[in-house]
Amino acid sequence: MVINASEGEPLSAKDRTLISLRPHLVLDGAVLAAASLGADDIVLYLSRGAAETEKTLKSAIKERSRSGRAEPSIRIVRTSHRYIAGESSAVINRVSGGPSKPKFSLQRSSERGVNDRPTLVQNAETLAHVAMIARYGSDWFRQLGTQSSPGSTLMTVLGNVKHPGVYEADLGARLGGVLEAAGGTVTPAGGALLGGYFGTWLPPALLNDLPLDVNGLRATYGASLGCGVVAVLPQGGCGVMEASRIFSYLAAESAGQCGPCVNGLGAIAETMERIADSNAGPGDLEQVRRWIDMVRGRGACHHPDGAVGLLASALAVFDDHLKSHLYRQSCYGATVVGFPQPPESGLGWR
Amino acid sequence: MSDEVRRRIRVNPILCNGYGYCAEIVPELIGLDDWGFPIVSTSTIDDDKVLRLAERAVATCPRLALLLENVPPDPG
């Protein structure tokens, strides 16, 4: 049983916020999941650099062992802070003693995972929900949410909102309600990125009525909540430039293992940077669109798929900005600040 | 061959170095991208001749990056 608390998504703060406030809830969920699976090994998977989170969890683990509870001991495995270190096969690779790089396998980790043993890799927030359901029952849990998305979810709301932070949202709610909880937008929204760096850009007109329910999101908008990040673009902000910056970060975060990811993301990033600088050559955009289709689905993990998905949605949503970039005009969004910028790429894989 | 186990070709993209022999041996199933890495067909192979070529491509790959995967029959 692996508790995935690595939270490699740069914009997300939900797991570390949850752990700082309710560490035992996450650990309770892991112990319950381990008991129902008959797992005798519980691993807490953490990113190096999450020093506070690690401190909180270490003292929580100590409290549990002092209380003399009959439960498997919980050991900590750390990895360097990388975007894909939390990908399921990368987690298994790292916990088995290797680097936190994805692996190719025809089998699921539930069949063959850590050290070839069947393994459940579960996100910290999901385990906290498990612990709450065990305490209060599924009827209680289903008081919030919808038939297809019961309960609540943690969302990190940031960018162009008055009170950025982590909010718990009813899955039956609409995005407008979440933005309202975050104090509303500072300037009218210029769009938003939903679901983090593997997510989907949404035009401003859709934001208020957007359902959080999984079916409503997927069926109507082809989007998903992903890691629960909502990053709101300021009025006039350029989604093409922001998406290009994020894409360059993601290209640099490739584990460097698969040809289509190494070559494809690299080539797309370079060409997109030219477009974002209003310095595109003839055919650059067509080339990017062709490469997006070319690399999709061809990595050992979904890193290339997530990256090109983000870019494709930006190209579709910010058509007006895209045109001014292509006509080599300086984009009026270039000077708009307030959207969170991607960090420097991480170092090492252990 | 509908009552037999159906097979399709898969590439392990981590092992693959883009030698490209596979695309020469069985172009019916494998093309190359702009950087010389294989784009493999995800459909099951329904032609015996193509299947034999696919087996040869699997055996020829210097990186042992290709494999033939058994596809369970449609439950419907």
Image (spheres, coloured by chain):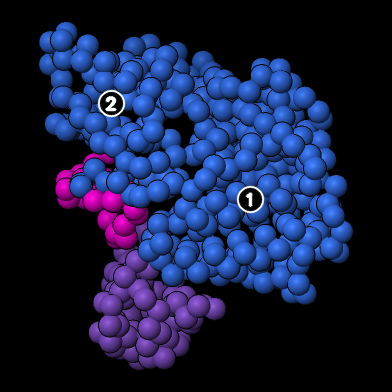
Chain colours: A blue, B purple
**N-terminal-most mark, 1 or 2:** 2
Instruction: Please name the residue that numbered disc 1 is placed on.
Output: A245
Residue A190 in the image: state x and y as whole percent. Answer: 78, 38
Front-most of A96 and A223?
Answer: A96
Q: Find the magenta span and give its range.
A: A98-120
Q: Is residue A47 visible?
A: yes
* Label 1 crowd bin: few (<14), some (14–19), many (20+), radius 10 Å: some
Task: Give the letter of the chain under mark 2.
Answer: A
Horizontal arrangement in the rendering, residue B31 relative to residue A89 (left or right): right
Residue A117 in the image: state x and y as whole percent. Answer: 17, 46
Element type where label 1 sits in the image: helix
Tag 2: residue type?
Answer: Ala
Task: Give the letter of the chain under mark 1.
Answer: A
Residue at 75%, 25% in the rendered image:
A185
Front-most of B7 and A19?
Answer: A19
Element type where label 2 sits in the image: helix
Depth-wise, is mark 1 or mark 2 nearer the camera?
Answer: 1
* Label 2 crowd bin: few (<14), some (14–19), many (20+), radius 10 Å: many
**Majority secondary structure of magenta residues:** loop
Q: Is residue A116 magenta?
A: yes
Instruction: Please name the residue that numbered disc 2 is placed on.
Output: A30
